[in-house]
Image (cartoon, rainbow, N blue to C red):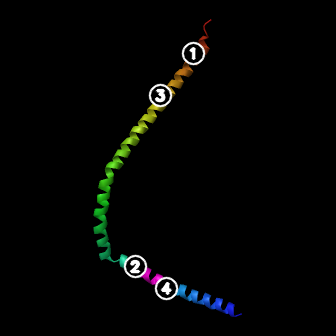
Amino acid sequence: MTESKKDISNNLSRDRFSEGQNEIMSHISEKIIAFTRHPDFLDRLHSVLDPLINHVINRVFPYVLLCSILFLIMLLVSVSTFIIVVRGSLMAFRSVDMAMTVGFPD
């Protein structure tokens, strides 16, 4: 019986601790939300992020352009290969069809 009372008291203390912890976390999160919605913070954040984003875009843009050009070249090569294969198979069908209509030489 005494062990079950200790378990119950431990569970109650854990619940009280978790309730207090939840209250603290909700209070801290409300403070953070209020701080981040302040106009001065937003202006400061924009003044830091705008140059950073512009710098990253300027550094990455040549690679994006190069990848786009390579993709277009590969697309053109694939389409031209497809056209060549289709033409070759059509010519083979035409020669078989012509042989069937004209007949095979004796």
Q: Amino acid at mark 3?
A: Ile
Residues shaded magenta: 22-30
Q: Residue 87's x, y, as percent?
A: 49, 25
The residue under label 1 is 98
User: In the image, which is nearer the foreground, mark 3 or mark 1?
Assistant: 3
Dot placed on the residue nearer the N-terminal end, 2 or 1: 2
Q: Residue 76's x, y, as percent?
A: 41, 36
Dot placed on the residue nearer the N-terminal end, 2 or 4: 4
Classify mark 4: helix, strand or loop.
helix
The residue under label 4 is 23
| Front residue of 78 and 60 | 60
The number of callouts visible is 4
The residue under label 2 is 32
Which residue shows up at 36% across the image and 42% down it? 69
| Front residue of 12 and 6 | 6
Residue 44, which numbered label? none
- The quarter of the image holding the C terminus is top right
Q: Residue furthest bottom?
A: 2
Is 37 a magenta residue? no
Residue 84, which numbered label? 3
Q: Amino acid at mark 2?
A: Ile
Query: In this picture, is 30 found above or below 82?
Result: below
Q: Amino acid at mark 1?
A: Met
Instruction: Count residues near mark 3 (Cα–Cα under 10 Å), then give few for <14, some for 14-19, many for 20+.
Output: few
Q: Do residues under tags 1 and 4 come within 8 Å of each other at their CB atoms?
A: no
Q: Residue 83's x, y, as percent?
A: 47, 30
